[in-house]
Image: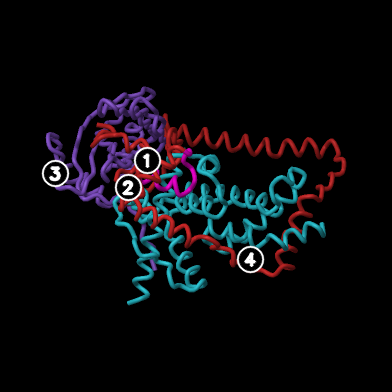
Amino acid sequence: MAAFEELVARHRDRVYARAYSMMRNEEEAVDLSQEAWVKGWQRLRQFHSQSSFGTWMTRIIINLCLDQLRKHKRQRAESIEAMDEESGGVERQMPVVSVNPTAGLERGELRQRIDQALGQLSYEHRMSLVLHEFEDMEYKEIASTMGCSIGTVMSRLFYARRKLAVLLSDLKNRDSV
Amino acid sequence: MRAKLIPATGLLWLTTALALLAGGELRTQGADMKFQAFLLWGTDASKPPEGKDYKPVSADIQKKLKELPLKWTNWFEVNRKDFAVVQGTVSDVAMSDKCQLKVTKLAGFEVEVLLIGKGKEVVKRKQSLPTGEMLVLGGNAPNATAWLVVLKRIE
Amino acid sequence: MDYNAQLKLQALLDGELPEDEASEVAKWVAQDREAAALLEELRNTRGALAGFGAEVRLPESRQFFWSKVEREIQRLETPAPKPARESYLAMVRRFLVPASAVAAVVIAGLMLNRSAGPSGLTVAAEIESALADSGAFTYRDYSAGTTLVWLSYPADNEAAEIDEMGTFE
C-alpha cells in the first residue's frame, strides 16, 4: 500500500488535470480522480509495464469521465449554445485567423485564455481535442473511445480547433481594447 | 361562528362533472389517435431554392418552433400528412421517398415513433403525447440548413 | 476550398495521411495561399495547446487525498460480516413480511385500476433509444408541450456527399 501511495503522489496531478480538462468542474474532477485511483488499485494486476503507469491511469480517468459525461447528457437538455455549435457546419465558413492569438502572451495568461476557451466548447468537441492534443491519441483510438466514426472525430476536431482559434482571437482583441 | 356547509346539490353536481370528465378522458385513451406530420426545411434564406414549391409553415407551427432553441429563421413545409393510429397497430407514413415515420399507439397517451431515413432506422422514441403536443425530430442538412419531422397530435 | 480538402489539411498536420497522399497535399499547400493560411491557423492552435494542463494541481493536500482513497479501498476490501444462523421462525417471517407487502400493493393496484377504467391512468416514462445515432439529445418545453430531439444524422462525412436539400426530401 505504501508503494501505491507513492504512485498516487507522483501521478495525482496528471490524473486530476485530465479529469478537470474533461469535466470543467473541480469538485467532480476530484471525485472522479479518487474513483480512478481506487479502480487503479483494484486493477493493478492488469497493468502491463509496456505502457507507462501514468498513461494507464489516464486511460482509467478518461473512461470514468466519459461515462459521467454521458450520464449528464442523458439527464439534461443541451443549452442553446451547444445546439448552435452542433448545427450548421459553421466552422467551414469561418475566416482564417491569420494572426497567432497567443503570440506575446505569458504562460499564465495563455493558460487562462485556453481554459476559458475550452470551457465554451461542447463536451464532444472538447473531448476530441483533449484526447488528441493531450493524450496523443490517433483518430482511430479517439473514435473507439468516444464510440463514433473516424469521420465524426475529424469533424469535431476540426470544429474545436477552428472555434478555439476564433475564441482565443476574440479574447485577445477584447483584452487589447 | 356557524361553519359554512357545502350545499349537497353543489357537491352532487361537482361529483357528476368529475365523473363525466374522467370517463371522457378514459374513453379518449382507448380511442384512435389522430396526428399531423410535417416534413420541414429550415433556412435563413427568405425563400425556398429555385424550382422547389415549398410553402411557409403555418403560424401555429412557426410559433412553436420559435420557442425552441433552433437558430434558423424560416421554416418551409416540404410535405404534410394527416393520419390516425389505432391501438396496437403501426401506422406507416411516408414523408418523402427517403423518409418514413412508423407510429405505434401504446397504452394511455404513450406512442412509439420510429424515424427511418434512407432505409435505415435513425431514432426510436417512446413518450407520452397528449392532444395538442408535438414531437420534433431534427438534424442538420447541407449548406447550413436543417430538416425537421414534426409530429403533432390533434386528437 | 471544400470541406473534405479542409479536413485533409488537418489530417496532414496530425500525421494521419498515408505517405503518398501526404506529399500530394503538401504540394497543393505550397501552391495555394488559402490552404497554407488555414494550415498555419491549425498549427498555431495546436502550438497554443502544447503543454497546457502541465501546471494544473489537484486542489487537495497529498495526505488528505490519499486518506480518502485509502479509506475507500479498505471499505471495498473489507468483507461484509457473515450473518449468524437464524431460527426457522425468523426465516419464515423474513419471507412472509415482504411477500405480504407485495400482495397488498398488487391488490391495491388492482382495485385502483378497476375503479379507474379499462386502461387506467399511467404516467409514461420517456424512453429513447437512438439507433443509428448516438449523438442525439433532447430538449423539452413543458409549457408549450413540445419535445425536440436533435440528431447528428446525417453524420458530417455523409452530409458532404449530399446535394442541396437532399437529406430527406
Q: Which residue is mark 1?
A: C156
Q: Evaluate if marks 1 and 2 touch, with contact meaning CB atoms under 8 Å apart.
A: yes
The chain coloured purple is B
Give how far apart the Cα atoms at labels 4 and 1 are.
Answer: 37 Å
Chain A, chosen colour in render? cyan
Judging from the image, mark 3 belongs to the subunit labelled: B
Dot in front, 2 or 4: 2
Foreground of the two, A4 or B26: A4
Tell me which amino acid carries mark 4.
Leu
Q: Is residue B72 left or right of residue A23?
A: left
Residue farthest along the top direction in this orientation: B89
Q: CA distance from mark 2 to mark 4?
A: 37 Å
Task: Specify few, some or many for label 3: CA neighbours under 10 Å numbering under 14, 14-19, or 20 or more.
Answer: some
- The boundaries of the magenta stretch are C6-19
Image height of C43 relative to C88, above or below = below
Q: Hue of chain C?
A: red
Same chain for labels 2 and 4? Say yes or no.
Answer: no
- The residue singled out by tag 4 in the image is C58
Residue C2, x across and y down, in percent: 30, 43
Residue B4 in sight from this viewpoint = yes
Circle on res. A89: 2
Q: Position of residue B103 (x, y in %)?
A: 34, 29
Q: Residue furthest bottom?
A: A177
Mark 4 and mark 3 in contact (Cβ < 8 Å)? Answer: no
